Amino acid sequence: MKGSESDARVDRSAPDGQRPGRPFDHSRDALVLSTTLDLLAERDYDRVTLDEVATRTGKAKTTLYRRWATKDDLIVAAIRAAGRPPEVDDLPDLGSLRADLLAVVDSPWLGGSARRLAIFLNLASAARGSARLAPIVRAEVTEPYVDVYRRLLERAVERGEVSAGLVPRIPLLAAVVPAMSTHALSAGSGPVERSHFVAVIDDVVLAALGVVPPRD
Amino acid sequence: MKGSESDARVDRSAPDGQRPGRPFDHSRDALVLSTTLDLLAERDYDRVTLDEVATRTGKAKTTLYRRWATKDDLIVAAIRAAGRPPEVDDLPDLGSLRADLLAVVDSPWLGGSARRLAIFLNLASAARGSARLAPIVRAEVTEPYVDVYRRLLERAVERGEVSAGLVPRIPLLAAVVPAMSTHALSAGSGPVERSHFVAVIDDVVLAALGVVPPRD
């Protein structure tokens, strides 16, 4: 969709068959898009530039602009290329709520928890600054991720691990791990350790649900 | 300290007694600083400019730059002028942990919960982009605020409302209200309602501590 829009734009500016430069090498999209996410993991949205993406990937800036007219186009393409969390289609089912929640923490989605957290924070600040990005970040990143937690909590009710009376609290509790981890990254001065996620799951989520975690 | 540095800088560029322009009217600092926080409540750090502060306060840009050489100087001054949460020196003591926690939610600090939350989010993104701002935001905003929650939870243990065995969990649980409220503002599409704070206190914090809240 985006590709055909770009092509149409370029075609208007040059006669057929005389388009300047080489055609965009679509096989290298993946590198450009993952480099864009690398930058979003390293720095604030406002400091992510097409120039830097061009430098890191060795592509000409004009080539990038021919394919993605704006930075937001590029970021949207990078978000879409990363896809939804794999857990959306393959919900962890490890026999206990605690193991399932830890499997989401340990998910490789967006490069694992450290890169994922940094990307979340910067996409959130991007979304605040861009009315176009905001609904896309919500629908394609934040909501699918919180939704995985919500479904795990609902399944724990079905399994009898969590009391059915707590169902109304599930939407709120599903946001606890994402909220506490971005807060820790934002408020702290270094990376968020796995032990922090474990404590949030045991001492906040499971404790609030009255589930006593097995101490290992 | 900042004022005398500014004066020294201006004095070097003009002979004594012939300083161009009127001296800065310090009585109007408060307006400039609260306007800076207003802007930080409305938009991302990168879109807060000295130009806009000048426009809104009716002051000349040069006048502002004479007093605050950079945007970060102005933001640091605005943070310091706002002061710490009043609860730091006057911890709410309303007889129950729930009432005390709600008193912090309802605090007028930084203009009440809606403005405060928006400022928190934008200062967090400012801190990520500025090595100079980061420790100041942490020490003067985030930590004192989380600390108020921590002290309220500790006092609930002293009161016998919360089991002493849960003391090790208090630092983590003290971050729940700030984390869940900035997450809700960031992930949602509108202001965070007071009912959200109440649900976080009852269904997450008090539930995790095994305190049954009185339903009203």
Image: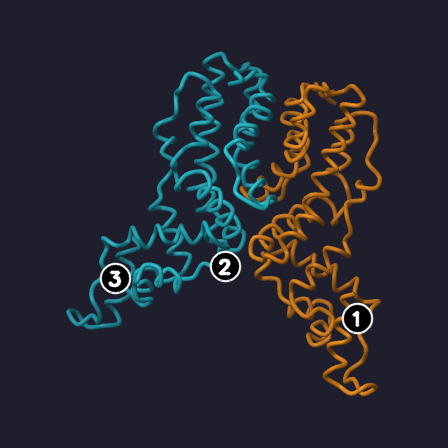
Chain colours: A cyan, B orange
User: Badge 1 local density, few (<14 within 10 Å), some, or many (20+)?
Assistant: few
Give the residue at x 67% y 45%.
B142
Report the residue marked by disc 1. Answer: B4
Give the residue at x 68% y 64%.
B73
Disc 2 residue type? Answer: Asp
Report the residue marked by disc 2. Answer: A46
Residue toward you, A69 or A202:
A202
Q: How far is disc 1 from disc 2 in space, using C-alphas?
A: 33 Å
Residue B128 relative to residue A30: left or right: right
Residue toward you, B181 or A165:
B181
Residue B2 relative to residue B47: left or right: right
Residue A152, x across and y down, in percent: 46, 24
Residue A90, x across and y down, in percent: 35, 27
Give the residue at x 61% y 48%.
B121
Report the residue marked by disc 3. Answer: A7
Is the residue under label 2 in contact with that under label 1 (CB below 8 Å)?
A: no
Q: Between disc 2 and disc 3, whose residue precedes?
A: 3
User: Badge 3 local density, few (<14 within 10 Å), some, or many (20+)?
Assistant: some
Q: Which chain is mark 2 on? A: A
